Each structure stands twice: as C-alpha cells, then as structure tokens.
Amino acid sequence: MAELEIKSVSKSFGSVEVLRDINLKIASGEFVVFVGPSGCGKSTLLRTITGLEIETSGDISIDGKRVNDVDPARRGTAMVFQSYALYPHMTVAENMGFGLKMAGEPKAIIREKVSQAAAILRLEKLLDRRPAQLSGGQKQRVAIGRAIVRNPKVFLFDEPLSNLDAELRVNMRAELIDLHRRLGATMIYVTHDQVEAMTLADRIVVLNGGIVQQFGRPLDLYDDPDNRFVAGFIGSPKMNFLDAVVLETGPGHVTLGKLGGSDRSLRLAFDGFDPSIKEVVVGIRPEHARLGESGPDTVPVSVGFAEELGDVTYLHGKTPGRSPMIIRSDKGRFSGQIDCNVAFDPAGVRLFDADGRRLRADGN
Amino acid sequence: MSAANRAIVAELYTWRFLKWVVAICVAIVAVFPIWWMVNVVFADPGVPVSINPRLYPTSLGSGLSKIQTILTETAYLRAYFVTIAYALLTILGMLLIGSMAAFEFALFDFPGKRILFGLVMLSLMVPTVVTIIPTYLLVADLGWLNTMQGLVVPGLASAFGLFLLVQFMRTLPREMIEAARLDGASHFKIYWYIALPLSRNAMVTLAILTFMKTWGNFAWPLIVAPKPEIYTVGQVVGLFNAPFSHQTVDVVMTANLLAVLPPLLFFLIFQRKIVEGIAMSGSKG
C-alpha cells in the first residue's frame, strides 16, 4: 500500500501537449479510475506514473519519495496491459515468475510466490499451460497474477477488460473489486467506459484534452459535475442539454426562456445568479425529466422511439429546437411517434455557461 | 445440373488440368539434371551412359564404390568438414549479430536510426562483385587469407539477414517489451529472454537460407582460401570439373552429387520453412 502524488505533471510529444498540469493525490489503498474519451491522455498518465513515458515537467512521488528518475522496474509499480502482454513462449508459472527471476530470486522463493498468487486468482491448475491455451479471462488473471507476484506498492491497470466479452467483463469487475478488498493495495485503473469507472472506483479522475476535468467520488461526479463535459460523460444515458436564454434574474431565482428552442420558460431557485450571463445551457438527467401536462414549466418533445429495457424505459425525442432529449418513463408502454410535454424536477437541473462551466448558486 | 453449369465445371476442370500439365513439365525440367546425375553415378562400370543412354540406375554397388573412392582417396571429406564449419560459423555469427542489430532497429528509437537502416538497405543494391575486391584487400591486410575467420567474418554482417529479422521483430508487440522492462529485465535480458525466443521462426528461416547460400558459395572461398588445406566443397568440385582434370564423367558426377546432397536434404527437411522465409522476406536470399 502506498500513497501516490502527482504534482504539476505535463507531457508533450513534440509540439503536441498530451497532459497539462496534472495534480492528483491518491491515498494509500484507494481504487482510483482514470476515465475519459479516446486520446484524452489517461493511458499516457498511467504510463508516466510507471515510468514508461518520461514527463516533460512536474513530479511524481510514491510514499513521499520522488520517483521521476527511478527506473520503471524499481518504482514499486506493476502494470496490467490491455493486450495482457503475456510472454507466449513461457508457461503461466514462468510468466508470473519472470519478474522475480530477473530480480535474481532463488527458484524456491519464485515457486512459492507464484503459488500464492495463483491461489489468490484460482490459477493453480493452469500453471503449466502456455498463454495460447488460455481463455481471455484466464489470460487476464495471469496478467494480474504477474503483477501480484511483484508485490508492488501501486497496481496500474490499462483498460484490462476491454478485450473481454460483456458477461466476462462484468465477472472480472467483481473479481477486481474482491481482489482490491483482499490485497488492500493502491490501484489505478484506466478505462473509457464510464459504467466500469462508476462500478469500480473509490474516486474517479475524469480527463479530457489532457486536463483533469474533475476528481471525486462517483456519485459526486454524477450529481454535482464541475462542467458540461463531466456532466455529459458520467451517466448512461447521458445528461440532456438544452440551450436557454436568461429572461430575468432576481433575489434567489432565475427565469430562463426559449428552453430547447421552445416558447416555454422555467423559473429556478438560484441564489446570486450573475446578471451578466445572458445565455445558459440547462442540464437535466433523464430520471429528472418526466412526462406531464402542458404548462408554462414544461417543454414539448417529439418522441421518436422508446427503449423498453424491462426495468426502465427511455424515450428518445427532440425538442422544438432539435436538441436531443431522453426521458425516463418506467411505467408506460409506447409505440410509434408521440408528442408530449416534459416537466423538469428543479432539484435535478444543472446550469452551465456558454463555455461549459458549471454555474453554482451561492453557498454551493 | 444445367448445361451452363456443366460448361463452367468443364472449363474449371480443363483449366486445372492445364495447370497440372505445366507444373509437371516445370518439375521435370528442374529434377531431370539431378536424376541424370544419379543415373550416371549409379551406372555399371565401363559402360558410358552417353553410349548407352537410359533413364534408370543400373548398379548401386558401382555408385557406392565411386563415393567411397572420392571420400577416401581425395581431400573431399576434409573439404566437407571445412564447408560445414564455414556454414555453421557463418550461420551462428550472422544470427547473433543480425538479431542484436534487428532488436535495436525494430524495437527502439535512437538518433540516426532511419539513415543508418537506409544505408544498410542500400548495400543490398550493391552487387557482390563490386565489394569482393575491397573485402579481399581488407582480409589480406588483416592476415586472414587461408584462415577460417577470413572465410567467415566478412559474411557475418548481412544486410539481407538484418532486413529479414527487422521485418519480423517489428511485429513483436511493444507492450510485451514494456512488460519485460517493468519486470526488471535489462536491455540485454529483454533481447535474450523475450525477443530472441519469439523470433525463432525468422531465425530458423535465416539459418536455412544462409546455409544454402554458404554451402554453394564459390567465388569468395576461391579467392580468400587458395590453400588446399582449407578448400571448400565448391572448390574441390571445381577441381574435378577443371578442363585438364583426368577424371571420367561418372567420377565428376559423383563429386557433384556429394556436393548437392546436403543442401538437397536440407531443402527436403525444411521445405515449408524455406517457402515461408521467401514469402516473409520477399527474397530468396
């Protein structure tokens, strides 16, 4: 177990800046997930932590010790690769024990440590097999076993489940949570799948364009996003965004008009709204939008199709301004195209300025 | 089956039949000289084949006795050992040097890498006859004439071998090399424990192609090792074939047959690998 601190880390490949001023403090034993779209820099950040990439500036410390100049093998990190990166010419036992062999450990110790790791991952019967004789899930466990054997301070996972089928991925997620609980180790996990991030993480780092957009507990990110990117990235189906204009501000409230291109308005409780802001984006999650009677606080939506998933039903429609809108409606059954009115739960409305920054009421 | 379908099937069969006919004709042209050699060697003594032409051997004992004569009464056996040593040392050296260089070129970046690799590849376009005299002068300056190192060393740095191995090593997953680095393997250990075993197929291919080339190499041994003690099989066969050689045609053919035998066996054993190698490198070495 170890604490990891990243201070002002930037990384450029030539003129392309991939990471910009990253600052993170990860507590000992924490399971942190880096999530973001492809090319956001999450894998580069992981590779920088482990030393496979050299940071352009900034410091990385593990347990208070600066490790920028420490060889990747001696940083106390172990990485599980997306492609597993198992050595195809070695058996499972040889794969798992390779790191110890390189460290010059006696054969008896290697055997013992490999057996212990194999027991944790239920790999005892596979030790003499070669990677080509293993299934995807088994290969993944061997790759994790190889990391465990090295007894690292920090485990790093680079999209380790993305090559597995959906069912196996769900099982492996549960196994990883269990493994984290048993080992109590600091783990950093990279994924582009926000569901995976929400399931696994103690805390999530949302990255976009090489910048940390927000770092926090999964539900904090879901309920209280710092910006439009985080609001849209976390949650499935994603948050609805409707353009609106500010009609009027007053003590403790703001009134918005032209909601989603409609002629409707919406009055919201909001302390200290900046009167200089004339245009906003209204964010509302599907579960905070409900079908209702036509009224001044509702938005007309033309529903194109319904996703009836059994436990939930999502209606996909468009507002008069052609903004896409998803509404959760669990009870009804729908067929064909319908026109309806959607009311918003005021507690679920999030406001963003034109640049995507979150607008918060005073005291929030 | 409709008439149209029958016509298509008939056309397919005709096409396939023609292809087989062409293939068999090419095979006959390729195999006939070797078969003729066997035919001449295993012929009754005193009955020249040219006077009494036939397409089948007539005397196993006569052929074996000619082989025995050549192996015991000439320097042929010694030349055999010299050539085997020449071929094996060249293969080992080329694999070692080629694989180390390919490891760096294929998997790592260093300043001037592209230019250096381009230069090495350019050397593939220079014919051997152009380089043979400067190389000879260099070997002579080093005092390596009539020595095994004189035969072997100039052939170790093979641009073709490097090209073949680089092409193969480029396909090794970068993550595997990084995993080994994280496992604490040094640069040399990554080469030794990971890159080398994973390149086994390409190495075997290169070894086979090098053997075929070295065994049949005539010009280089001829100029760099003119001393009879270090004659290779090619040179000895050359003596049998020389204009003033007093050997009869069946003895000359026996010498030729013995020279052909190792590469022929090699080819039969490693046929698939050789074809794979040619396909892999786009060259026959």
Image (cartoon, rainbow, N blue to C red):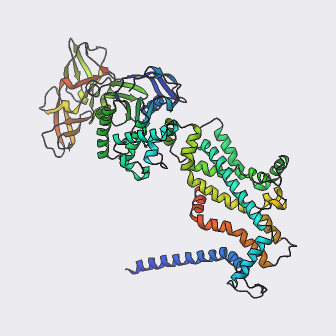
* Residue B35 location, quadrant: bottom right
The residue positioned farthest toward the front in the image shown: A108
User: Residue A219 falls in which quadrant of the image?
Assistant: top left
Q: Is residue A265 visible?
A: no
- What x and y, as percent, mark residue A187? 37, 31
Q: Is residue B236 left or right of residue A170?
A: right
Viewer-proximal residue among B9 and A43: A43
B31 to the left or right of A350: right
Residue B271 visible here: yes
Query: In the rendering, at what x and y percent does residue A68 appear?
Result: 51, 24
What residue sits 40% from the left and 29% below the top?
A: A208
Toward the viewer: A125 or B125? A125
As drawn, which residue projects farthest toward the right? Answer: B244
Q: Residue B7: give x, y in percent of width and height.
A: 44, 79
Residue under the point 38% across and 31% down: A188
Left or right relative to A127: residue A349 = left
Q: Quadrant of the C terminus of chain A?
A: top left
User: Which quadrant is home to the N terminus of chain A?
Assistant: top left
Figure quadrant of residue B80: bottom right
Residue situated furthest bottom in the rendering: B52
Residue A45 is situated, as x and y percent measured from the top left of the image, at: 44, 30
In this orientation, which residue lies closer to the viewer: B264 or A13?
A: B264
- Note whether A170 is above or below A258 in the view shown: below
Q: Residue at x 57, y 40 (%)?
A: B189
Residue A240 versus residue A25 in the image, above or below? below
